[in-house]
Amino acid sequence: MPLNEEVINCEVAQSSLLRKRLVQSELLATSHNSLAEEKYRREYSYLCASLSSLQNIYSPSPHHPDCADKNMCCLNVRRQSCCEAPSKHHHSTHCCVFYENETNASTSSNTWLAKKKHFRDTEEWKIKKTRILKKLRALSKINLAMVLSRMPMTAIYDMTRRVTMHDVNADIDNDYDDENDADVNDFFAPDSSHRYHNRQQYTIEKLPDKVLLHIFQYLSAKQILQTGQVCKRWRSVSCTPMLWRFVSFRPNYGGIQVSQTGQDHFLQLIGTRFSELRICELATDLITPNVLHELGNKCPKLQYLTLDFSTAMQLHDFTDLQTFPSRLKSLTLCLSENIFLEGFLRKVYTFISSVETLHIIGTYEKVEDEEEEVYETVNVFKLKQFLPNLRVVNLWGVPFITDEHVDAISSNCAHLECLCVNYCPKITGSCLKSVLQRCRKLKTLFLAHTKLDSNIIKQVEWEKTRIEELDVKGTEITSEALISILTRLSHLRWLDASWLENMTDQVLEAWQNSNSMGSLQFLNLDTCDSINEQALVDMIKRHGHQFHGLCLGGQHKLLEYFWMNMIPQLKNIRVLVMGIAEDCCPKVVAKIHVDQFIDCIAQNCPRLTRMEIRWDDETLRFSDKSSKFIDVLRMKCLMLHAIVLSDGQYYELVRSNFERADRMSVVRTTEMCRTGLLHCSRYFTQLLFN
């Protein structure tokens, strides 16, 4: 069936592959207006120019006629095999190539195109192309190096900055084009040059206020005040109430200081800037009737309030106080040594019934003489009547707190879950029996550094309680009392029994035989010198797989052999403390190969988050190759974010290794940081203060 050229010209595109195949097979006549013909003409012109240059090179010499004939013969052969047919518009005096008819010309051009396309698909052409590109790149690098060697440093910096900016903007434009539809971009999008110009204008000044507000939320209160000094727009954003949800006005603890002359302006800001306030800490100078009145009326979302009276010399007159924040969940009172708060608390009793967490922070750290007279600055017996919803009570370091006060608090707190009386020297434990009977929901009991009576402790019905966390650190209870407690607490998961002289092998053996260690996950036996190595080996072999935190520091008997055998048993460990400080006696004489420790921990403890090694450089044995083992630890324990080491050469080695990996705050010294298990408590966040 003959081909209809008119239909083909209308239906088949000029640049389509089908038209090229029809022309090559001589089924369709070529058109001078087609795109393919224009391409052929350009290639033909290029070949003509090349052949004219060759003709000049091989032109016959008058002195060698034979050689001239030979060159012309060779040139004619090349012309016949390589050249295209010229159109009538391309005849030129610079090219001396002629064909006798147009048929031979079209056949020659088609043959040449086929050979050219076939050659591009061969492996030989790909190899040659790769070699050529490599040579070009090498030459370009050499030329660039020669140019850079003669350029000043300022010009090199400016050039690299421009190249980097160009690459970044090119990537942005590519991402922008990929995200949008092609047709929509063709119709709506501006020209690429305008878009590139717009990209250069995208700075932080162009960000909307909502984005700036989200960025400012990661700043502290002092940093937000500094950003407000940049410009008027940033000042208006920094005054947004959403940024002022947590504010501390205690300069001694890193808060904002309000001068005496600025208190009137501070009262005005409470209703505007602090309308979204949720957590507030007030120093003594700001605990005034006017400030508390404004907080109660204009801060409806305030839930956590700290009132610091520790530096007070005299209280303000609260006779006119009529309003106080009434939706508090947590109230913290920092007591003074000789300032009585009954006059102030009498005005706020009716507003604090919603409080669930009560902190009363005493003056334990300030007491210099134990025989000094202690004043009861807070009436606990009256305070407990207005706090029926208490869940967490923290009486930290209050010297006048006795068992009677604790018993009074428990009489009106049926929902009590956590009781902390750490550093209360007058607590003997006589209140525990009644407290545990009334507060059935009590799970956490902290009795650290109290004067517990062993005989009273034995009389408590521990088996009927739901105690999960117990702290008896630094007490003087006997081994029999410890056995009585531990063997009857079947739900215990967290125990701090550090600094106990009566924590012996018999206690551990009786505890294991009672099958009460099935739920234990966190154990602190720091500086328990009465425990031998074999007792700890038996305990770890039986229950090491369930430990998430283990502190065995301060024990000079536990050396390299013990830890190399016990670390493989601690597959799920997250917090690990080992070693003895350099100022502790007796002094460790044996050398510790720390590289073996590090490698063993890296291979067996992938979930490790905190680790402390207290041995000093005189005890540890390491070398320049220790960095390889540290690399393994850093790559294996990906959750590790705290390593505490004794200050010395090994500390500097580990620190530099982690800093090269951009982990600046991981390695710390024992002089500035200590590792414990308190952060593993369920009520750790509720017990935080200051």
Image: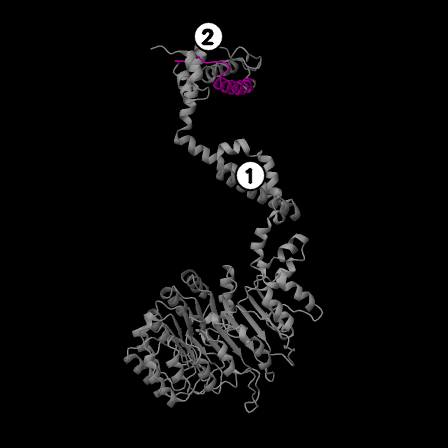
Q: Residue furthest right?
A: 261
| 40 inside magenta stretch | yes
User: Which residue carries the number 1 mark?
Assistant: 140
Region rendered in magenta = 26-55
Q: Amino acid at mark 1?
A: Ser
Residue 689, given in percent of the width and then of the height, sits at 52, 73
Task: From the viewer's perspective, tell me whether residue 297 is left or right of residue 381.
Answer: right
In this rendering, the count of numbered labels is 2
- The label on residue 88 is none
Q: Left of 547 or right of it: where is 345? A: right
Instruction: Name the amino acid, label 2.
Output: Asn
Front residue of 139/666: it is: 666
Q: Quadrant of the N terminus?
A: top left
> In this rendering, is residue 313 above or below 564?
below
- Closer to us: 382 or 32: 382
Residue at the disc numbered 2:
101
Compared across the picture, whether 483 is left or right of 373 comes to left
Is the C terminus in the top left, top right, bottom left or bottom right quadrant? bottom right
- The colour scheme of the drawn protein is one colour
Magenta-highlighted stretch: main secondary structure? helix
- Residue 575 image offset from top left, x and y in percent: 41, 70
In the structure shown, which secondary structural element does the residue marked by tag 1 occupy? helix
Q: Is 314 drawn above or below residue 275 in the view shown? A: below
